[in-house]
Structures are given as structure tokens and as C-alpha cells.
Image (cartoon, helix red, strand yellow):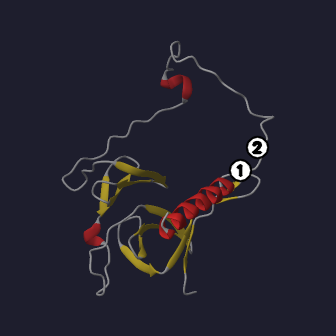
Amino acid sequence: MKPLKLFLYVLLYAQSLTLSTFAQTGKVDSSNIVTLRIDPQSARGAAVSQIFDEVKFIPLETTKESLFGNIAQLKVAGNKLIIYDYDTKAVLLFSNEGKFITKIDAARLQTDKEDKEKAQSYGFMTVIEEGKDYIVIFTNNNAQYFTFEGKFVKKVKNFNYSDGITMADGNVTVKQFIQNKSN
């Protein structure tokens, strides 16, 4: 067998051992887990009123600019509905009554002179900094801040992002933050 082929086989074997070792998880306390078995043949749905106390249908205003395709993210923040449309890579803002406020699309994202491509968004999150609410849109190499009215505020390059930390005991601490790496 050729040395290169032998080396690749040994490497793949070592890789599979390493992956199986790291894939092992700790023991899970299952004493408080209740198993619910549902027979799919006899399963029935429930009326919305049996699950929710109140349901409010909010039709969104339809304009040429407010059209969207696929909702990848939806967030209710204060009195605003914020939607990230995966198809157009845009963030749309509506009032809690469904009135269209604005759209933040690639044309409104700030690009640097050295960037060879136009900026594209990859989702958003809302943050509160110094008592003010912001929508943070992530692009290839920066995070861009907008007000809830869609006005550009600032751009942060070289950022770290986190929206949750899972502890060893299984608890999840959710703390969203964006930090400039140069700080």
C-alpha cells in the first residue's frame, strides 16, 4: 500500500475515534422527565381557544416596499414588529397595529471603500445601549446599528457576538452583547 494512502487511512481512523470521544455527553437526570406517548392515528388537534387566552390577528400593511417573502426572524420589541426577510435579506419594521414603518435593505447598509462587494445582512438582534433601543444588523465584516425608525446610527467592525451561554448543569443564561474586539 502506498504511504500516502496508508497515512490517510490512519488519519481517518484517528479522526473517527476523536469525534466519537468528543461526542460523548454527560449523564442527564431523567427523574423529573415525563414521557408523553401519542398515538398518531388517534391524535386530534385542539382549538386555539383551548391553548391561548387571547389571539389578536394583526394584518400587516401591504405596500410596494413592504412586500416580503420568507420570514426568517420575527421579534416583537416594544410597540414594533421587526421581521427579517430571508429572501430579500432585509429587515422590515411595522407598528404593533401593522402599519409599515420602514425597510432596511442592502442599499441602506454602509459599506467601506475597501469592500469589494455590497454588504448583505445575515439577521438581526435588538439591543439596549445607554437606555436606547437599537436594531443591530450583521453583515460580512461588521455589525450596523439602526434606530427603531430605521435610521443608521453606527457601524462596529471586529465584533464579538453572543446571545446565550449554556452552563455545565444545563441551565442557559441569555445575555445578548456585541463587543468591539479592539476594546
Packing grade of label 2 (10 A; few <14, some 14-19, many >=20) is: few
Q: Compare residues 140 and 16 and report the one nearer the observer.
A: 16
Residue in view at x 31 percent, y 60 percent: 89
Q: Is residue 133 visible?
A: no
Circles 2, 1 touching at the beta carbon (< 8 Å): yes
The residue indicated by pointer 2 is: 28
Q: Secondary structure at mark 1?
A: loop
Disc number for residue 40: none
Disc number for residue 25: 1
Q: Compare residues 86 and 1 and report the one nearer the observer.
A: 1
Image position, residue 43 (x, y; %): 53, 16
Q: Disc 2 versus disc 1: distance between alpha carbons?
A: 9 Å
**Occupied quadrant, residue 131:** bottom right
Image side of residue 65 versus residue 39, left or right: left
Q: The disc labelled 1 sits on which kind of residue? A: Thr
Image position, residue 101 (x, y; %): 31, 58
Packing grade of label 1 (10 A; few <14, some 14-19, many >=20) is: few
